[in-house]
Amino acid sequence: MTTSAEHIGVSERRSAHNYHPLPIVIHEAHGAWVTDVEGRRYLDFLSGYSSLNFGHGNPKILQTAHEQLDNLTLTSRAFYHDQFAAFCAGLGDLTGKDMILPMNTGAEAVETAIKVARKWGYQVKGVAPEQANIIVMEDNFHGRTTTIISFSTDPDAHDDFGPYTPGFTVVKYGSVEAIRDAIDANTVAVLLEPIQGEAGVLVPPDGYLRQVRELCTSQGILMIADEIQSGLGRTGKTFACDHEGVVPDMYILGKALGGGVVPVSAIAADEDVLGVIKPGQHGSTFGGNPLACAVGNAVIEILNTGEFQERAAQLGEVLHARLREMIGHGVVTVRGRGLWAGVDIDPSLATGREVSKALMARGVLAKDTHGSTIRLAPPIVISQEDLLWAVDQLADAIASFR
Ligand SMILES: *Cc1c(COP(=O)(O)O)cnc(C)c1O
């Protein structure tokens, strides 16, 4: 197979249609740029949904991965290995938490957080058996397992996959009152994204996270922040919660934690919470494997320098200033933080997908989220020049529909 058309033809026939990819077949990538099988180059403005925060083929991460591949790749958790302690201690220090529970994918880490919160509810808080309840948000995205989609409000994610897992109460995102009204004696946790990525990079009102934190503390329930997409530098801070000086009881991390190389996820919490899990009660064959931990350790070292957080903050200012100029020129609203933006295109002009295709024709890869929203999340290694060039392409792509 040589041409894009051939690859796409076979993929369409032989793979399930659970995604609707743009018609590009990528062959290689470095930094913020990808090259397709015909040799055309594109600027990546999606970063694997923020899995590639540190760029494609980040030299430090790749070198670590290569060395680890040659030494040791898998032990299972039946034994310790020499990358494990550094990963747990390093991620614990980065999050300010006592303990780590490593998994692989984001959804698994969310499942882990749900299990830990429930066990904590029964064993520490004293909730009656089988009654634990977790408050979640409208338009949430936490992954694709049957339990997680049970509390999704997106019909595509949710419908026809029942029977559904009980124990969740959905409330409006951004409203502290809605959470307060939903809390009862069986509530064990509030689970939220500090910025809702899949929903269109929705930033909650100022003070919301702080008020949720205070409410959870005063009510004796856990605040769980799903920072899988918002965390690890994307917003200009290590965690999106940092923008409000908020520390949740549990962080859920994934995506960029794997450096764009392997799936690495984890939850981080203090011992009074994560200590409820005892041998045999949770696990994963691949979770915390040597390759994952080595790559994770490289990511943690990168984050400890603060360079990427700083860069995302600086370039984010540039990005948002330029995007704001487009409001009224085919753009209705712009949201986001750091190097992360949701751009609502005037729906009378084009759908998000149509704009994404027009953008691809101009050499920039981005993806629509819902309806007429485009999500912009370039690798943080991007140059300012490339960033501004890509936004010019977006303006041009939108103008082509006017
Ligand atoms: C991507 C994502 C997940 C799920 O991660 P997977 O690795 O795809 O299972 C969960 N929560 C948020 C906020 C995400 O962006």
Image (cartoon, grey):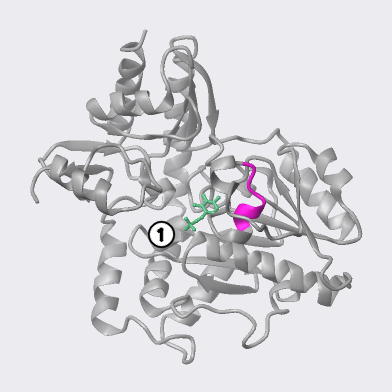
Q: Is residue 155 above or below residue 254?
A: above
Residue marked by disc 1: 302
In the depicted structure, whether residue 348 falls above or below residue 210: above
Q: Residue at x 59, y 35 (%)?
A: 202
> How many callouts does the rendering have?
1
- The front one of 261 and 64 is 261
The residue lying toward the viewer, choosing from 68 and 7, is 7
Question: Foreground residue, 251 or 145?
Answer: 145
Task: State which quarter of the image contains the C terminus.
Answer: top left
Q: Is residue 256 left or right of residue 332?
A: left
* Residue at figure coordinates x 33%, y 45% from the top left: 381
Magenta stretch, residue numbers: 148-153
View extreme (right): residue? 185
- The image shows residue 136 at horizontal and vertical percentages of 71, 50
SS under mark 1: helix
Residue 100: within the magenta?
no
**Which quarter of the picture shows residue 32?**
top left
**Residue at position x 67%, y 85% from top?**
278
Which residue lies at the image location 33% right of the left edge and 80% below the top edge? Answer: 73
Give percent across and percent down for residue 135.
Answer: 76, 52
Find residue 316 and report its horizontal and vertical position in percent: 46, 34
Q: Does ligand 1 reach within 8 Å of label 1's beta carbon? A: no
Dividing the picture into quadrants, the one containing residue 251 is: bottom right
Q: From this view, report whether residue 163 is shown above or below residue 365.
A: below
- Mark 1 residue type: Ile
From the top left corner, tell me how far across and down residue 313 is, in percent. Answer: 48, 39
Locate residue 131 relative to residue 137 in the image: left or right.
right
Q: Which residue is most to the bottom? A: 79
Q: Residues within 10 Å of mark 1 (few under 14, many from 20)?
A: some
